[in-house]
Amino acid sequence: MLSQEDIIVTKTDLRGHLTYTNDVFLKISAVAEEQALGSPHNFIRHPDMPAGIYKLLWDSISTRQELFAYVKNLALDGAHYWVLAHATPSYDKHGKHVGYHSMRRSASRGAIAQIEPVYAQMRAAETGLTGRARADASFACLRALLAERDLTYSQWIWRIVEDH
Ligand SMILES: Cc1cc2nc3c(=O)[nH]c(=O)nc-3n(C[C@H](O)[C@H](O)[C@H](O)COP(=O)(O)O)c2cc1C
């Protein structure tokens, strides 16, 4: 179980393969460090997560922007956990882009209750699609839902954070 104080930290190379994991990540993912390092980050992907969120993640961090997102992750023992994740690109001392960094904290029940129906609609928009078409349809659904609420993605996330 993830406690309120826990912070999950991972770092990846430019392809999203793990180069660092803290102990909290290893414990919550039920994975050994030797197994985790070098693996693509998607080995903890939960099937309930819409592809559009990962499109938004990669579109943001690969263009030097940070992203906050609510994420449901899978542990290798079959358990799952919800987090509020922050991901950023990392640079070496010459400013060269060398990889990515992410920190996550446990998400509150109230926040999860706000997020789940939106992600369910995004997943419904993915039905029958694969690859890029799936991610695009899912992301278009998110944009439409946010437009209905007259909110940007950041405004939506921060409203949920503040309310819970
Ligand atoms: C720094 C960083 C952190 C990431 N954290 C997660 C994560 O916690 N859970 C997850 O499923 N994917 C995470 N990803 C995204 C994965 O690389 C991948 O895009 C996602 O799991 C979807 O995989 P798929 O496109 O194979 O379906 C992270 C990527 C980066 C670069």
Image (cartoon, rainbow, N blue to C red):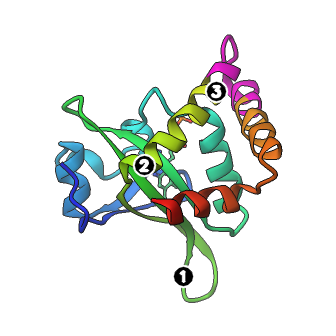
From the top left corner, tell me how far across and down residue 145 is, in percent: 75, 38
From the top left corner, tell me how far across and down residue 154 is, in percent: 68, 61
Residue 53, compared with residue 120, is above or below; it is below
Image depth: mark 1 or mark 3 in front:
3
Depth check: give the residue in front, 11 or 122. Answer: 122
- Residue furthest toward the top? 128
> Which element is circle 3 on?
helix
Residue annotated with mark 1: 92
Residue 82, compared with residue 152, is above or below; it is above
Residue 57, compared with residue 68, is above or below; it is above
| Type of amino acid under label 2 | Gly
Task: State the separation of the CA atoms marked 3 and 2.
Answer: 18 Å
Residue annotated with mark 3: 121
Image depth: mark 2 or mark 1 in front:
2
Depth check: give the residue in front, 40 or 107. Answer: 107
What secondary structure is the stretch in magenta mostly built from? helix
